[in-house]
Image (tube, rainbow, N blue to C red):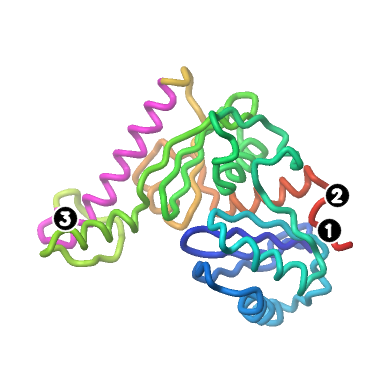
C-alpha cells in the first residue's frame, strides 16, 4: 500500500491507497514541534482502527510547506515503515515530468507543484488550480503541462481572523454561505463580505489569467472550502478534494525507484 503525507500550514493529512482506492484519510493539526513518535502514536492508532498494519505500507511519499515537519515525518517513515520516503520538491533528482517555468523554481511550494501535477494528469490543460487552504492559491498549468506560476492571496480563515482582530466591534464568526448578499445584521453582513468577496476575487482573477494567457482554461478547485465556493462561482468547473494526494501518488508513479521499502 502507498502512504501519502501532505503537511500544510494548518493540517497534516495522511492517506493510504491500496492500488484501487483510498483506504483512509486522516488529519492532525500542524505543530512544528511535534515529534516522530507523536506522529506514530496518532497514525498507527488510526491504522489499527482501519485494519492496516505497518507491514502493509511498502511505499511512501510526502510533501510539506512547513520545513520543521520534514525531519519528524521522514523519521516516522523510516522508523515505523522501514521506508526512506520520496520527498516532493523542485529538485534535479526528482522527475516531475513537466517544466517549472518560474524565475526561481526552488521557491515554489510542494503543494502547488503537486496540485499542478495532478491537474495536468487528470484534467485538460491549460488549467488553473485554486486551492482553498491557509492561503488561497491560483496555479497555472500551460497547454503542454508546464507549471508557469500563479497567484497567492490570503486564505478565508486568515481574512476572517484579521477582520475580527482589527475591528473592535466585529465578532469572530463561523464561515458559511449567506442566504442574501445584503446582510441585515453584523454576522450575515460579514459572511456575505467574505463569501461574495472571495467569489468576486475568484471570478476576477480567473478572468484576468485567461485574458493574459489568451484562451479559456480548465478551472479545478481543491481544499476544504472548494465545494462551497463552487456553488457561487460558475467558473469553477471541477472540485477535487484529493488533488494534492493524487499529485503525490502521480509523482511516486513517475519516480518508481524512490520511496520504496529497501
Q: Is residue 185 above or below residue 211?
A: below
Q: Secondary structure at mark 2?
A: loop
**Cβ–Cβ under 8 Å for marks 2 and 3:** no
Which one is nearer the viewer's eye here, 222 or 28? Answer: 28
Q: Is residue 203 visible?
A: yes
Alpha carbon separation for disc pair 2 and 3: 54 Å
Q: Which residue is mark 1?
A: 260
Q: Secondary structure at mark 3?
A: helix
Q: Which residue is mark 3?
A: 189
Which is more N-terminal, label 3 or label 2?
Answer: 3
**Chain part drawn in magenta:** 183-211
Which one is nearer the viewer's eye here, 220 or 111? Answer: 111
169 displayed left or right of 156? left
**Cβ–Cβ under 8 Å for marks 2 and 1:** yes
Q: Nearer the viewer, mark 1 or mark 3?
A: 1
x then y, percent, for residue 56: 82, 71
Q: Nearer the viewer, mark 2 or mark 3?
A: 2
* Image quarter in which the C terminus is found: bottom right
**Residue at (45%, 54%) from the top-left corner?**
133
Q: Which residue is mark 2?
A: 257
* Image quarter in which the N terminus is found: bottom right
11 displayed left or right of 6? left
Amino acid at each position: 500500500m502507498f502512504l501519502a503525507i501532505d503537511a500544510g500550514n494548518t493540517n497534516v493529512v495522511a492517506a493510504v491507497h491500496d492500488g484501487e482506492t483510498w483506504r483512509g484519510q486522516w488529519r492532525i493539526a500542524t505543530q512544528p514541534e511535534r515529534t516522530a513518535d507523536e506522529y506514530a502514536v496518532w497514525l498507527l492508532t488510526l491504522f489499527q482502527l482501519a485494519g492496516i498494519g505497518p507491514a502493509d505500507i511498502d511505499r511512501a511519499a510526502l510533501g510539506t510547506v512547513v520545513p520543521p515537519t520534514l525531519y519528524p515525518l521522514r523519521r516516522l517513515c523510516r522508523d515505523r515503515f522501514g521506508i526512506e520516503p520520496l520527498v516532493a520538491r523542485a529538485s534535479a533528482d526528482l522527475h516531475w515530468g513537466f517544466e517549472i517555468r518560474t524565475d526561481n523554481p526552488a521557491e515554489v511550494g510542494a503543494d502547488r507543484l503537486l496540485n499542478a501535477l495532478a491537474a495536468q494528469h487528470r484534467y485538460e490543460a491549460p488549467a488553473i488550480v485554486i486551492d482553498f487552504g491557509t492561503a488561497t492559491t491560483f496555479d497555472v498549468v500551460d497547454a503542454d503541462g508546464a507549471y508557469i506560476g500563479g497567484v497567492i492571496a490570503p486564505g478565508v480563515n486568515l481574512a476572517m481572523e484579521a477582520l475580527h482582530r482589527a475591528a473592535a466591534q466585529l465578532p469572530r464568526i463561523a464561515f458559511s454561505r449567506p442566504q442574501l448578499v445584503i446582510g441585515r445584521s453584523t454576522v450575515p453582513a460579514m459572511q456575505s463580505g467574505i463569501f461574495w468577496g472571495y467569489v468576486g476575487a475568484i471570478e476576477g482573477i480567473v478572468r484576468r489569467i485567461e485574458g493574459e494567457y489568451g484562451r479559456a482554461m480548465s478551472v479545478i478547485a481543491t481544499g476544504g472550502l472548494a465545494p462551497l465556493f463552487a456553488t457561487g462561482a460558475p467558473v469553477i468547473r471541477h472540485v477535487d478534494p484529493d488533488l494534492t494526494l493524487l499529485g503525490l501518488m502521480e509523482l511516486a508513479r513517475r519516480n518508481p525507484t524512490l520511496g520504496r521499502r529497501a
